[in-house]
Image (cartoon, rainbow, N blue to C red):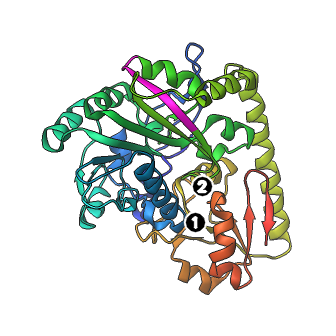
């Protein structure tokens, strides 16, 4: 039982905190790995505090993606690019082609931040109705992106129904999401939380998209994404683009790997339990030596780890976070105070549990905390203390 991972709390909200089952299932028909206990989207996104641009590493990542798409698909003046789940506009701002039309779709209050940065944003969930409104005003989209979004959608059919309506005949829809096989192989269990309803592989996705006259024509595995290693999937209207051999290669790889074998997932569960045991052992040793511990960065996925490990403010004094919307709040479930990086540096715990472990290289190079002698306990994929 866990609270939604982005439901950071004010101190006066502790008594009203709600928890829900967080359990992973596999469909024995299509082999999609998914949650079946769904927290309503409205309750998650009404008071949303995640800001993509608070991560400099992620900002660069999406700027690079925008440049890749601009070049690959020859964007020109007047072309429409749509980012579904645009958050604060991080990806849309990465496009530098003059006089293209940049449009965001964002259901949360963060839409206002994107608007204040000069972007046009439809404040709503994406459906066929949303798509028709956009087409009526701007025409069809050359590129549609959904980065760290597609796997969040419960009524995925209503979402996908809107794509053929919005997409130009030669248009491209790009999904970027954590890849199921990376999650299992590297024991990246913390990306499992209520907002992430599906854990994607091509095996269930290809036949699902075919129902809507859409097909995967290219796929790329990338070592870095919003939640760790990711898969970038390129989709078009059926027959619009040549399907690359890489798609069949990945499908064959998933089959050989055992995406349809339950043993793959039970082994994963055992490794997750082992990581918990090893991390808690390291924490116990550090505390026994008299060391003080804090946390560094407060991503949503970090709350899966904190709650599964039963780590509270008795273990971590506070957590440093650059996102101002999270500062002054408490982590859901574990109730650890979140402070600014400046405040964290004033207290300077000797060790910090790095919850954004996927940014470890960035933090080792850029973090003032490390420059001042602090050390990170990196919990995943296996616990290690650096530098």
Helix, strand or loop at mark 1: loop
Position of residue 273 measured from the top left corner of the image (x, y, whole percent): 77, 41
Q: In this view, does 76 lie to the left or right of 225?
A: left
Residue under pointer 2 = 302
Q: Left or right: where does residue 167 sit relative to residue 175?
A: left
| SS for callout 2 | helix
180 sits left or right of 21 in the view: right
- Which class describes the residues within 10 Å of circle 1: few (<14), some (14-19), or many (20+)? many
Residue 278 lies within the magenta run: no
**In front: 69, or 16?**
69
Any part of residue 316 in sight: no
Please determine whether, in this image, residue 267 is positioned above or below residue 271.
above
Q: Residues within 10 Å of mark 2 (few under 14, many from 20)?
A: many
In this view, the residue in front, 159 or 5, is: 159
Circle number at residue 297: 1
Question: Could one spot residue 174 in this view of the protein?
Answer: yes
Above or below 61: residue 337? below
For the point 28% across and 67% down, the residue is 117
- Figure quadrant of the C terminus: bottom right
Q: Distance between the residues labelled 1 and 2?
A: 8 Å
* Residue 198 screen position, x and y as percent: 52, 33
Q: Specify the principal SS of the magenta part.
A: strand
Viewer-side residue, 224 vs 156: 224
Sequence-first tag of 1 and 2: 1
The residue depicted at 13 percent of the width and 43 percent of the height is 137
User: Marks 2 and 1: in contact by CB < 8 Å?
Assistant: yes
The boundaries of the magenta stretch are: 211-219
Q: Of all residues shown, which one is farthest toward the top?
A: 29
Q: In which quarter of the image is residue 184?
A: top right
Q: How many marks?
A: 2
- Residue 186 location (% of width, % of height): 73, 43
The answer to whether 161 is drawn above or below residue 1 in the figure is: above
């Amino acid at each position: 039982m866990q609270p939604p991972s982005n439901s950071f709390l004010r101190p006066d909200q502790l008594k009203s905190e709600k928890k829900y089952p967080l359990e992973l299932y596999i469909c024995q028909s299509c082999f999609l790995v998914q949650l079946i206990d769904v927290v309503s989207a409205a309750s998650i996104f009404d008071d949303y505090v995640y800001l993509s641009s608070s991560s400099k590493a992620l900002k660069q990542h999406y700027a690079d993606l925008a440049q890749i798409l601009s070049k690959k698909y020859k964007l020109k003046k007047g072309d429409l690019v749509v980012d579904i789940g645009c958050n604060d506009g991080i990806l849309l701002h990465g496009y530098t082609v003059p006089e293209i039309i940049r449009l965001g779709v964002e259901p949360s209050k963060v839409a206002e931040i994107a608007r204040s940065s000069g972007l046009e944003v439809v404040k709503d969930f994406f459906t066929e109705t949303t798509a028709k409104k956009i087409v009526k005003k701007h025409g069809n989209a050359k590129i549609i992106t959904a980065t760290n979004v597609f796997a969040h959608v419960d009524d995925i059919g209503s979402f996908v129904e809107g794509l053929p309506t919005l997409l130009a005949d030669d248009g491209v829809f790009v999904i970027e999401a954590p890849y199921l096989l990376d999650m299992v192989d590297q024991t990246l269990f913390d990306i499992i939380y209520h907002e992430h309803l599906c854990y994607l592989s091509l095996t269930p996705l290809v036949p699902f998209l075919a129902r809507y006259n859409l097909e995967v024509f290219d796929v790329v595995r990338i070592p870095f994404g919003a939640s760790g290693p990711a898969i970038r999937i390129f989709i078009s209207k059926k027959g619009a683009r040549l399907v690359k051999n890489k798609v069949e290669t990945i499908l064959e790889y998933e089959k050989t790997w055992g995406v349809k074998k339950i043993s793959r997932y039970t082994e994963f569960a055992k490794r997750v339990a082992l990581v918990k045991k090893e991390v808690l052992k390291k924490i116990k040793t550090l505390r026994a030596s008299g060391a003080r511990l804090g946390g560094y960065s407060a991503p949503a996925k970090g709350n899966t780890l904190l709650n599964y490990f039963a780590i509270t403010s008795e273990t971590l004094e506070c957590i440093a976070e650059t996102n101002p919307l999270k500062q002054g709040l408490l982590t859901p479930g574990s109730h650890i105070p979140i402070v600014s990086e400046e405040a964290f540096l004033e207290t300077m715990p000797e060790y910090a549990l790095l919850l954004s472990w996927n940014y470890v290289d960035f933090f080792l190079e850029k973090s003032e905390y490390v420059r001042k002698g602090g050390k990170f306990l990196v919990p995943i994929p296996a616990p290690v203390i650096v530098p």
